Every structure is written in structure tokens, then in C-alpha cells.
Image (cartoon, coloured by chain):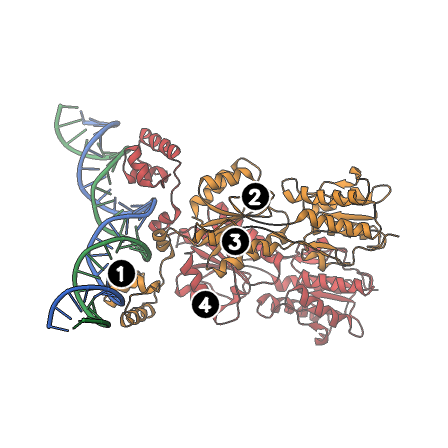
Chain colours: A red, B orange, C blue, D green
Amino acid sequence: MKKVTINSVATYAGVSKKTVSRVLNNEPNVSPATREKVLKVFKELDYTPNPIARGLARNRSFIIGCLYDNPSKSYITRVQSGALEACHKHHYNLLIHPCELRGEELIANIEHLLTTSRLDGMVLTPPFSDSQELINFLKKKKVHFARVASAIDDAESISVRSNDEQGAYEITEHLIELGHSNIAFIKGHPDHSATEQRFCGYQRALAEHNITFNPKLVAEGNFSYHSGADSAKEILDLNPRPSAVFASNDYMAAAVLKLATQRQLKVPEDISIAGFDNAPIARHIWPGLTTIAQPVEEMTRQAVEQLILQISDEQTPVYQATLEAKLITRESTANYK
Amino acid sequence: MKKVTINSVATYAGVSKKTVSRVLNNEPNVSPATREKVLKVFKELDYTPNPIARGLARNRSFIIGCLYDNPSKSYITRVQSGALEACHKHHYNLLIHPCELRGEELIANIEHLLTTSRLDGMVLTPPFSDSQELINFLKKKKVHFARVASAIDDAESISVRSNDEQGAYEITEHLIELGHSNIAFIKGHPDHSATEQRFCGYQRALAEHNITFNPKLVAEGNFSYHSGADSAKEILDLNPRPSAVFASNDYMAAAVLKLATQRQLKVPEDISIAGFDNAPIARHIWPGLTTIAQPVEEMTRQAVEQLILQISDEQTPVYQATLEAKLITRESTANYK
DNA sequence: CCACTTTCTGACACCGGTGTCATAATGTCG
DNA sequence: CGACATTATGACACCGGTGTCAGAAAGTGG
């Protein structure tokens, strides 16, 4: 069985390559009879056009790359899900590329990626969306890209974020309104801009409610469950023990919940726990976690959609949006008593 | 800034296209002086070869596609992680393509995928690894593929699986040895072959320990947390209430744990709960879930590695392996009293 | 120094499509 | 029916690389 190319189809159908190409792309100016004939030959020879050849001629791969380096698996899953939705809608495909932000090889790594598979564009998720170095590199290479949840202000590139500071403010305020004033905080990964923003929201809420900020109540995490477990230990060992904990994401909050339960503490009776992101785990455990629903899928979906728009038409204005985060209260937070 | 192609480099360096190509691919028979000269021009012009053109000439894309349709996000994450490890090792990239097994459009969908981005090979994960229709289609299209966790016996294609039946047997036996005899079971998604195998292991363990199989103790799940929650309700409402529950995966087990806790049941004192997969959630909750560690990453890693071998050399013998699953006991199971 | 390898190098076709443009076929209208 | 617009088709260059093969340059041995 020989390979079926556009040439064989053309010969077999008794028309030129170009006419076959026209039928392939549904171009006008092909007589119905000819079109019919060619389509029949497609079927007969079971012809599939070669996407690579197509890509070469049109200078397109119809592939978007997704860059990430994130310990939170559910975050990645949600990012992918949003990206895929936009990709498939526009007949693009998604290539995933986890890699490490740190290390001088980052640029070399990305360069290799571009050398290996020509991507029409890239979605940068945290912490890459905050890497000025990477952004400069991509601009220089004239690679289209979109930033998700980036704190960098750059009017030239697509950006979709959510209001982390406000979300953190609201959830902290929620705890304060429940009567808590001794509220511990677990920070996220220092490379992520969200870490600083959520921390600011926490501090602002305290300040606006006249609660003195106490640095001893702050633990350093990195968004991973494991780091949450370490921070949980620190916090639960404090004397006096805080009556509430706000962790920068749900994984770390889950770790606090686990340790508290192990230590026979009742949640929320003895201690309230709040997370961030509304990851699946927040509702898979008991008590369910009070958290901030961050529209990760939607952010990514919009970012990719705009990216594809930009790829198809360079004139598209640069899209920048900030989506709302929403407080979701579950059983893990209750009145202070 | 004009596009830098192999032609511009050739002209600039005063050599032929072919010589540039030789330097690019580290081919022998280029004098050191010439090689040096060309390399310098690469730097000067900041030249990056076009992967699409390369792919066309060599008939390779260096992209592997990963097919899945699985409600368990952590399973997918682990699959991706294993696949990526193998891909990056061999300088391949990974394209992800979730799609639905059901529906006649599956083949059309895959055909479209192949039309859009030429893949060098595909990894099939459950339930696709069990779709005879898809396997036949890929064979016909002469697309390389590897099956992960497939129950189909096909000596012609790569397959890496784990011993689900044995794993289910062992965990059921573990419960029996703890003194339980009234053990409920939650099935997985009917499209997945693992569902049947795990069910068989459960039944075999009962039989070999002279416990009569009771169909009333079996609930229908589909591997999702949500389905686990439904099944949990059924099971916990049974009279008498089973003293142990074995769910076909950890998500569903977590759902049982949550409902039990909500109903003030103590786990494992009042009821033992076991899962399957050793998903992250199994150790993120309290009590930690007794489960079967399935080497998902390793299975996928091996499958992809073999796939790449086969792509590079058609003569490679077809690899088929079955990896061991291992019992992990945590706090969610204890003696019957 | 010549015959004979071995090492370089480039011309050219080719991978499988698409874009441009000229020309052929067909349609329209006074 | 002729002048002209419109539609249909194909020849050919081109996208940016790689494979083949022939010929030039350099190395080797007697």
C-alpha cells in the first residue's frame, strides 16, 4: 500500500494538484462536477492530507504550547481543561510542556521546544507568566503568547488574571466577621505573584478591621500539600493556637485540616480553616473547605481564545481582563467561641 | 528583521544549503573550519531551523499524542507525567487529546487529529486502550501506538499493564484477614477493563476465603468522586451496614469516607474503607486510605519509551509487560470488632 | 610524482502541500 | 454574434529543510 499524496489523487482524478488543494480547502471556483469527482477519489484512495506539508506551506502548525511549573496538580488540570476547550473550538491542538522556572537552562529549554515543534503560540501559566526574561525572549523571537494570572503589567501582550488580592481580602474578612482575630496565614510559592497578592489581601483585611498584623502567624509554604503539612505543624504548635488558618491554596489547607484532625481538634469548632482556588479536594473532604473560587479554566480559556485570535489576525487588539474571584463558604469555617 | 532561513545562512556563510544542513545535524564530513564558520553565522543571524520543514523532509514530527477520557484527574496527571518523562528523554513532545469514547464521532475525531497535527505515535490510556475499533483504525492508518492498562490481548502492539485482578484480590484479602466478611464493593466505569478485573479480584478473594458473594453489596460507580458519593449513600443505608467498603478507586473511596464522617461514623472503628490507585488524595485526607499502589507513571513511561523505540526502528520487537500492584495500608482499615 | 582512497562540498531533486498568475471555458448583455 | 466579465483550471514557483550522487580537494602509499 503506497502512500497517498495529493499527487496521486490528482493523477487518479485527472485534475491538477492545485484543484485537489482547492477541494481540500473548500475554496470557491471549483465546478460541482469536479469537486464531486475529487471527493470521490478521496474516499476511494482513503486520502488524508499531510498536516506537516500544509504547515510548511502556510507557516502554521495549529498547535498551542502550554507552559507550567506548578506543584498543584489540580491547577494544572484546570488550566489544561480551559486551554483545550479554546483549542478544540478553533481546531487547534495543545502541547504540554512542564519545565522548571529556575535554572539558566529555561531559555535554552524553550528554544529547544520551539526548534523541535513549531508552535503557533504559547500560554504562560504561573510562574512563567511572571518571568520578564521569558517574556522578553518570546517577544524577540516573535512568538505569540498569552499570560494567565500574571502580575506583570505589559500592555503589549494578552493577559487574563483574577483578583487575588481581593479574594484574599474577602476570605480573611469572612473569618474576621466570624469573630476570629488570631488568624494564621500560609504563604504560597515565592516565585508566584499570586503569593504576594494573597498575602497583601490578608494584611489589608486585618488592617481595615483594626487587627494588628503578627508576623509570627505567617508560615512559608509553596502551594504543595507537603509544604502545607510542614506549615500546619508550625501553626498548630503556636501558643496560643490561632483560632483560624487561611492557607494560600486548598492543598495546603487540606494539609492543615488533616493534621488538626489527627490531633483530635474539631474543625471548625476548635479551629476554622480556609483555602484558596476551590480545587476539587476542597469538596472531597470533610468538612468541606471554605475557599475562594478562582476561575482558572475560564481565565485560561479566554487567554487561549485571544491568543488564537491574535495568531489569525495580527491586528487584533491586545486583550487584557481581570476576572472576579468568589467566596465559597463550606463547613470548615465557623464562629469563634 | 527578515526571517532567517537555511538559505540566508548559506549565502551569508558562503557555503551551500546542504553544508549548513550538515552542520545543523552534526553530520560528519564537514571540515572543522567550515563547521566553525557556519556555527558563527548561526549565532550572528540568530538562526533557528524550522521544525516543520524538517518534519516534512524527514517525515517526522517528534510529537506523541496522548488520548484519554477519564473522570479521574489524578490518573490523567500521572499518565501525563510518565509520558512526558519518556518524551523529553528522547526529545519528543507530548500533545494531549481528551475525547469521548462513546459516540460514532470517535474515529472521525481521531482522524481529524491526525489530519491536523501529524503525530509520530499515540499512547492510548483507558478506556481507549480497550477499544478494538480504535486499535483497528490505527493499524489500518499505520499509526504507531502503545496501550496502557489494556485488557485486550494483541501480540502485535505494545502494551504495559498492571495486575489489577491481583491487586483487588490482595486488598480484599487484607480486609478479610482483619476479620471483615460483610464487604461492600463499588465498581468503576463499565467502559474500563479495570472495572471488571478489580471486581473479579474481589470475588476471587471472597470465594477463596469461603465468603458467599452477595450482589446486594455491589454498587455501580464510574470512577468519579460524584459516583462514589452516590454509591456511598446506597451502601451506608444497607441493613445490616457493611463493616468494610472496597471502592474501585481512591476518589470513590474518599467519597465514602466523607459521607461516613458526615454521618458520625468513625473510620476505621465503625467501618473500614479501602481504595485503589494510591492517588494523592489517599494520603491527603484523614484517615489515610488503605489502597493499592498502581504504577501509573511507570506504566506510561515504559509504554511511551517503547513507542518511541518502535518509531525509530520498525524492527524493534513488540514490548508487552505487566507490572506489579502493591498493597499500601494506612489508617482507614482496621480489625473488625 | 602518480594512482588511488578518503574526506569535503555543492547541485539538484524531493517531501506534500499552498499562493500567484496566466489562460481556458463559460456566461452575460447590447 | 461579438465584446466583455466571470468562473474554472493548471503551470509553476515556493515554503525550508533533507537525501542522493557526482565531482573537487586533500591524504596516502609505492
Badge 3 is on which residue? B304
Whole-angstrom CA distance, mark 3 to mark 1, is 35 Å
**Same chain check for tags 4 and 3:** no
Tell me the kind of residue under disc 1. Answer: Lys
Badge 2 is on which residue? B128
- In percent of width and height, residue C19 lies at 30, 47
Q: Residue at x 44, y 61 (%)?
A: A113
Whole-angstrom CA distance, mark 3 to mark 2, is 15 Å
Question: Of A141 and B68, which appears nearest the observer?
Answer: B68
Question: Residue A107: which disc?
Answer: 4
Give the number of the mark in front: 1 or 4: 1
> Does residue B210 sit above or below A144 in this rendering?
above
Badge 1 is on which residue? B17
Instruction: State which chain disc 4 sits on.
Output: A
Whole-angstrom CA distance, mark 4 to mark 2, is 36 Å
- Which secondary structure, mark 1? helix
Tell me the kind of residue under disc 4. Answer: Ile
Q: Is residue A72 left or right of residue A266?
A: left
Instruction: State which chain disc 1 sits on.
Output: B
Q: Earlier in the sequence, mark 3 or mark 1?
A: 1
